[in-house]
Image: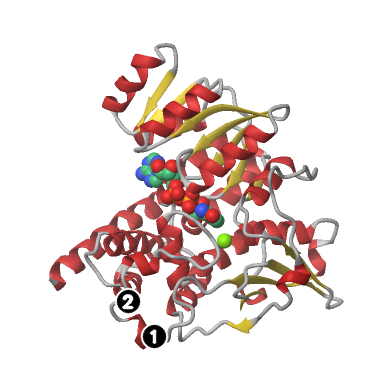
Amino acid sequence: MKQIILLGASGSIGEQTLDVIRSHPELFELAAFSVRSRLASAYKILDEFKVRAICVKDEQDADEIRKKYPHLDIHIGDQGLLELAALPYGDTLVNALVGFVGLLPTLKAIECRKDIALANKETLIVGGKFVKAAVKEYGVSLKPIDSEHSAIFQCLQGNAHGSVEKLIITASGGSFRDRSRDQLQGVTVKEALSHPNWSMGAKITIDSATMMNKGFEVIEAHYLFDIDYDKIEVLLHRESIVHSLVQYCDHALMAQLGTADMRLPIQYALTHPARLPLMNSETLDLAKIGTLHFEKADFDRYPLLGLAYKAGRLEGNACAIMNAANEEAVALFLAGKITFLDIETYVFKAVESIEFIENATLEDIIRSDGAARAFVNEAVKGAV
Ligand code: NAD
Ligand code: MG
């Protein structure tokens, strides 16, 4: 029986994780979860599962919950996320938070010897070095939920690490893949939020449209699979059927194919090496699909992809700056305060302007995150 602590239960990955837990009650138990703003979904979860602890946004939400569940162990805010990660029970943390806020709870759970199933890629973008070191020190497992990394993880099974020549991460191209850069002027938030293949949270959908997401996934792969940036390639594949590939030294290419259903990578991260039936899922009908397309990734069309390789190679605090600037810029775009193309501009400006620290400590990373957020907000104010 796996006792799961789920951070970000009301989000897209969170809800699909609940689906996986629900479909295998003999294997999984939801021990604790967090929500930020959706109390209605917290009530639904509490009514359905026998949960022992919860984390909510503030004191007011805690009081609300306490009225109906007086015996529940209730935690609050960022500190509450850390407390959930450190509960004396719960052997596995599923991190389905979005953004930098996921880093410290991941590190805390590792220190408390919990296995990690990671959707929150920002954890590895900003703190990959620290997370890897902690995983090694505390002897826990870190399994990917991101579909591309789950595909690679699946393709690596049974093959020696030393025989890997290259990882090939596929990319759908996001909402604006059929537009030139000139045609990106004046695109709306609504247009940016309509991803052709996947239904996901708002931030990752925008990151997919700028390809910041694919850049993040390159960095994520570097840390998850201990592989040089030179050996990680991005390949455009508009159908999102081939979820990613591994090229071996004998030039065998292993790929994992499937429909766009995140419950498969979530479930695999929780059951590996076992495979279980996936409830209410469709099999892939390749004859019906007929044709798959692949194209070279265009770094001029998607400059943030190139920046991610650069920041990833630089290490230090470079990725923390890039990530924080991107989080702020995406939030400003979603709030209608800057244009879609401004996202790139502010991320580049922040990386160029904020002091690079080569041997950044975790404290440096946290400070750089704050500095980049302040930089973007100041720059936006200055521009209007
Ligand atoms: P989402 O926006 O749907 O959900 C995010 C969750 O995090 C919500 O429960 C929200 O309440 C919580 N949250 C956000 N900020 C918080 C804060 N400051 N404090 C506490 N809780 C906070 O996002 P999502 O699409 O589910 O993505 C989650 C993570 O998984 C992201 O890192 C994303 O890149 C990654 N991911 C998502 C998908 C997908 O299909 N949705 C696929 C691959 C990877
Ligand atoms: Mg992905």
SS at badge 1 = loop
Asked if the residue at tag 1 contacts the one at tag 2, i.e. Cβ–Cβ closer than 8 Å, the answer is yes
Taking the spot 57% from the left edge, 44% from the top edge, the residue there is 16
* Residue 59 x/y as whole percent: 28, 25
Q: Amino acid at mark 1?
A: Arg
Q: Farthest residue in the front direction?
A: 288
- Tell me the quadrant of the picture where the N terminus can be found: top right
Q: Residues within 10 Å of mark 1 (few under 14, many from 20)?
A: few
**Could you give the CA–CA distance between mark 2 and mark 1, rounded to whole angstroms?**
9 Å
Within-10-Å neighbours for mark 2: few <14, some 14–19, many 20+: some
Q: Position of residue 341 (x, y in %)?
A: 32, 76
Q: Which mark is residue 181?
A: 1
| Residue at point 70%, 42% (across, down) | 279
Residue linked to disc 2: 341
Could you tell which of marks 2 and 1 lies nearer the N-terminus? 1
SS for dot 2: helix
Location of residue 203 (image quadrant): bottom left
Query: What's the colour scheme?
Result: secondary structure
Residue 221's tag is: none
Q: State the residue in front, 262 or 370.
A: 262
| Residue 225, visible in the rendered structure | yes
Q: Is mark 1 within 8 Å of ligand 2?
A: no
Residue plotted at (62% across, 72% down): 239
Q: Furthest-top residue in view?
A: 71
Above or below for 310 versus 23: below
Vertical arrangement, residue 72 with respect to residue 4, above or below: above
Residue 122 visible somewhere in the drawing: no
Residue drawn 42% across the image and 86% down it: 180
Q: Position of residue 21 (x, y in %)?
A: 63, 34
Q: How far across and down, in percent of the image, does residue 122 sit?
A: 48, 55
* Of 361 and 239, the residue lying toward us: 239
